[in-house]
């Protein structure tokens, strides 16, 4: 019974274990203020995770989301400040452009058969280039309108608003994966694209939509990031994609599909990454050590998780060599 | 019979295995003598493949002991150790590597080396492969990639691979599941020769004639228990079947299908269909309620034709008419017209191994249990449940992962996902590959019932008794061309086989 329960909620157990260790190490860890800080610090990654998770589920990957978030911020600033389009039109236009970019990536991956790793890695570079070009490499300060600034600066019930945005997106994504035909089909395509096609599921369409979803949440994250940092800047999204992928994989969604995927898992993965950084800060570990420790913790968490998930399957693999 | 311990190559004592608390093998005793063909029979899910996996160290046993050639085997061990022991295995799930060639697969891990280096001698590998292919007279090209081969040919590669290892024990888990009678005969001769040479063979099959023809002894499993060990003179197909299912096969199981009323309306017509290099000038029509058998050796183009009709592969010329109207086949359209398609390769094309039974069955039915894109879980469960009952999938648990089902039960899942739909045409390519005798009869009556309701059935099968028993009409193909059509219902297996092999 206990092992079965543990098996099902192992990620949550690992997270609680981490929290327990951290609260023993530092009494400041378990305060509302600190926890709210952690959640706030991961909200951007959390928003992006909710959409980006569909590319690994359909056995792809999207490494362009960091650059696309930055580009979205820059585009938005241009539309609103330089062209004076107004808040809502600027937001909508930004999202539309981002989704179109995702759609094109999806088409290139599915119709021309370019491996997703290659095309989205290239996209990471060229999208960053476009953002640099448009912003001339400068930071564009954003101070107005107040309704937009409130997103990044405001609080509800004492918690920063970006946390709520993250929670809403995670919930929506969870519903999409578990309760809709798209979610079912995405898992099926990840499990076996040939069987999916022969069953009447349009695998190419499902995969293409995955890249639109990741682009969509990248745009949202880019906008929230603008509001939080009160500026648009091409360098703002650098490296976000790796944090996003790390969180997704830590959460138990393997790269390369296979019929698995869990949005709540990915959220827990995101929080874990947040805990690691926060713990290191609380322990006053010099920042030059952070990447090393983060890497080690991620590897051990993955090893633990992988072992549990594969169960006796690892034996089979070994024998098949 | 006197047996000196030296006669015994493999001995299992108290072998027990369970998965997550479900006992799959319980306290099994067995032995395999040197130079005998020992058959292992039992219904789908009886535990046959599991026993193979235990002998070969793929899955660890929970309890008991397995001795090989006088030494106790460890609980689990790698493939290389199995080969060193002198055990060659043909697993039920073919284990070839798709991207590699026939020769590369045959010598995988045992590649001939260039002189004293560790580099692979590619030329020698191909000539060596050619030599064995010739020796056993298999229709294979050593340089062909596995991907490009039909299931039947892959099966032949797997057999060759096992033959190319000098082994004391050959284990064959349903080696003929996708072989034609002619190829099966080839294999039987090989098996008999091996026996002469003193090699032991553990043979698993659902085809009773084979078991009867080959076996020196037969072990019967039922629900994970050993229920009998029969000597040569005690073996008869009826005896084995009744031991397997735990009762006598009632008359009704063998009853011929009730006469059907073929309505006469044509539902599908194919005119001068061609596809580059695969088949040419294929014309036939299918009536409502008719079961049209398509026969031919592996490689005759039968699979390619039905794939083209279903819309998977392109057609270069010719036309397809559904209900009198010309269509350009695409999978999506075919499904909406009420086609069902059971492919020959269940692992790669039929099921989602990592997904549970319910998600597999429902993968063809999104139109029936989703509304505005949202899933109605009750509707989904109902569809899954009806599919599970229709072909008696075991276990009945809709959340059971398909990859953990026995081979025959996986095949039932592929059938179920189409049977739950309202069909107009059902295309079935080797529908009962790996399915046990009792369940086969159930599936035959399901197919006959569909036909009685007016569904047109295109049936491909290497199993000639199955083909002649079910079909109202049979067309025979050779090298991509139609060479004969049998119209009357008293078609014999002899005739079909002679036509397929080019004797008429
Ligand atoms: N990895 C696994 N996890 C859980 N259950 C399993 C696993 N592998 C096999 N089983 C179960 O063990 C039982 C025996 O399976 P096995 O594959 O040995 O049957 P079999 O006799 O070979 O049947 P078939 O004739 O259909 O091939 C089945 O009920 C199957 O569902
Ligand atoms: Mg089996």
Image (spheres, coloured by chain):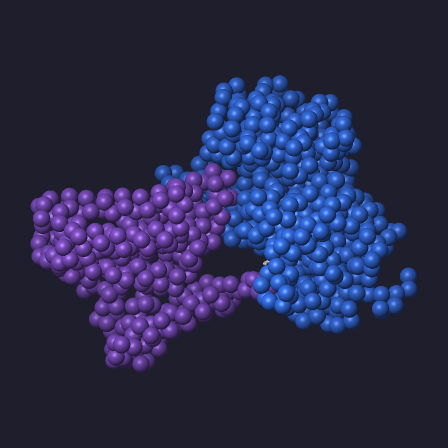
Chain colours: A purple, B blue
**How far across and how far down the image is residue B467, in percent?**
70, 33
Residue occupying image coordinates x 63% and y 60%: B111
Residue occupying the point 51% across, 36% down: B312
Q: Is residue A226 visible?
A: no
Q: How far from the left and from the top, in percent, is residue A54?
A: 37, 51
The residue positioned 59% from the left and 19% from the top of the image is B265
Give left or right: position of B89 versus A201. Answer: right
Q: Report the residue at 8% width, 54% height from top.
A: A144
State which quadrant residue B437 falls in.
top right
Is residue A308 at least partly visible in the picture? yes
In the image, residue B35 sits, relative to residue B315, either above or below, namely below
- Residue A19 x, y percent position in the rendering: 34, 73
Residue B291, relative to residue B342: is it above or below?
above
Task: Specify the farthest residue to the right.
Answer: B2
Q: Position of residue B213 (x, y in %)?
A: 82, 46
The answer to whether A298 is drawn above or below residue A132 in the figure is: below
Is B320 drawn above or below residue B89 in the view shown? Answer: above
Q: Quadrant of the C terminus of chain A?
A: bottom right
Comparing B284 with B156, the one in front is B156
User: Horizontal placement of A157 versus B446: left or right?
Assistant: left
Total label count? 0
Judge from the rendering whether residue A108 lies leftward or rightward of residue B106; answer left or right.
left
């Amino acid at each position: 019974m206990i092992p079965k329960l543990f098996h099902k909620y192992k990620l949550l157990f690992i997270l609680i274990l981490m929290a327990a260790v951290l609260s023993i190490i530092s009494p400041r860890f378990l305060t509302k203020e600190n926890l709210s800080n952690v959640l706030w610090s991961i909200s951007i990654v959390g928003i992006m995770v909710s959409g980006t998770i569909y590319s690994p589920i359909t056995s792809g990957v999207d490494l362009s989301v960091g650059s696309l978030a930055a580009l979205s911020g820059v585009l938005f600033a241009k539309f609103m400040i330089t062209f004076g389009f107004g808040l809502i039109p600027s937001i909508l236009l930004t999202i539309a452009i981002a989704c179109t970019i995702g759609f094109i990536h999806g088409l290139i991956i599915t119709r021309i058969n370019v491996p997703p790793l290659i095309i989205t890695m290239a996209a990471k570079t060229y999208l960053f280039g476009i953002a640099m070009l448009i912003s001339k490499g400068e930071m564009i300060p954003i101070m107005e309108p107040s309704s937009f600034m409130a997103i990044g600066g405001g609080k509800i019930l004492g918690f920063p608003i970006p946390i709520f945005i993250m929670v809403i997106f995670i919930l929506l994504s969870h519903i999409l994966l578990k309760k809709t035909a798209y979610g079912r089909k995405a898992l099926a395509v990840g499990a076996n694209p040939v069987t999916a096609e022969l069953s009447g599921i349009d695998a190419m369409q499902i995969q293409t939509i995955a890249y639109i979803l990741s682009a969509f949440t990248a745009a949202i994250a880019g906008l929230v990031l603008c509001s939080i940092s009160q500026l648009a800047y091409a360098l703002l999204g650098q490296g976000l994609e790796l944090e996003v992928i790390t969180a997704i994989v830590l959460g138990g969604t393997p790269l390369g599909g296979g019929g698995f995927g869990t949005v709540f898992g990915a959220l827990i993965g995101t929080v874990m990454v947040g805990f690691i950084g926060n713990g290191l800060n609380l322990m006053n570990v010099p920042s030059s050590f952070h990447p090393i420790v983060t890497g080690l913790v991620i590897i051990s968490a993955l090893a633990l998780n992988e072992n549990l998930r594969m169960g006796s399957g690892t034996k089979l693999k070994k024998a098949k060599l | 019979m006197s047996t000196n311990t030296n006669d015994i190559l493999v001995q299992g004592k108290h072998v027990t295995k369970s998965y997550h608390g479900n006992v799959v093998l319980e306290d099994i005793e067995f032995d395999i003598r040197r130079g005998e063909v020992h058959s292992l029979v039992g219904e789908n899910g009886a535990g046959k493949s599991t026993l193979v996996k235990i002998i070969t160290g793929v899955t660890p046993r929970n309890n008991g002991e397995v001795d090989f050639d006088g030494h106790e085997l460890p609980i689990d061990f790698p493939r290389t150790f199995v080969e060193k022991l002198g055990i060659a295995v043909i697993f039920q799930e073919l284990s070839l590597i798709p991207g590699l060639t026939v020769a590369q697969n045959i010598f995988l891990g045992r590649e001939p080396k260039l002189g004293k280096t560790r580099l692979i001698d590619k030329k020698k590998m191909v000539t060596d492969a050619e030599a064995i292919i010739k020796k056993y007279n298999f229709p294979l090209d050593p340089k062909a990639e596995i991907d490009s081969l039909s299931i039947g040919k892959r099966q032949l590669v797997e057999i060759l691979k096992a033959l190319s290892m000098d082994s004391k024990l050959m284990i064959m888990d349903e080696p003929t599941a996708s072989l034609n009678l002619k190829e099966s005969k080839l294999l039987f001769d090989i098996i008999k020769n091996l026996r002469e040479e003193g090699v032991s063979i553990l043979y698993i099959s659902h085809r009773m004639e084979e078991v009867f023809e080959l076996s020196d002894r037969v072990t019967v499993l039922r629900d994970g228990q050993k229920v009998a060990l029969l000597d040569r003179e005690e073996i008869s197909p009826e005896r084995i079947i009744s031991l397997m299912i735990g009762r006598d096969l009632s008359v009704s199981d063998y009853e011929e299908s009730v006469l059907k009323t073929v309505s006469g309306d044509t539902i599908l017509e194919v005119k001068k269909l061609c596809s580059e290099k695969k088949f040419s000038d294929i014309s036939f029509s299918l009536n409502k309620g008719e079961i049209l058998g398509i026969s031919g050796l592996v490689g005759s183009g039968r699979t390619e034709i039905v794939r083209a009709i279903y819309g998977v592969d392109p057609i270069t010329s010719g036309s397809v008419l559904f209900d009198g109207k010309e269509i350009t086949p695409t999978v999506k359209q075919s499904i909406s017209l009420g086609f069902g398609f059971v492919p020959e390769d269940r692992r790669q094309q039929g099921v989602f191994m990592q997904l549970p039974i319910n998600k597999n069955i429902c993968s063809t039915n999104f139109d029936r249990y989703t509304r505005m894109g949202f899933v109605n879980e009750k509707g989904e469960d109902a569809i899954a449940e009806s599919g599970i009952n229709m072909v008696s999938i075991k276990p009945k648990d809709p959340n059971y992962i398909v990859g953990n089902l026995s081979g025959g039960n996986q095949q039932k899942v592929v059938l179920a996902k189409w049977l739950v739909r309202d069909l107009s045409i059902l295309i079935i390519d080797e529908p009962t590959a790996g399915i046990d005798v009792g369940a086969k009869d159930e599936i035959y009556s399901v197919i006959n019932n569909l036909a009685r309701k007016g569904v047109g059935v295109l049936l491909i099968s290497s199993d000639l008794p199955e083909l002649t028993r079910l079909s109202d009409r049979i067309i025979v193909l050779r090298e991509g061309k139609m060479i004969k059509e049998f119209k009357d219902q008293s078609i014999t297996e002899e005739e079909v086989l002679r036509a397929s092999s080019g004797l008429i």
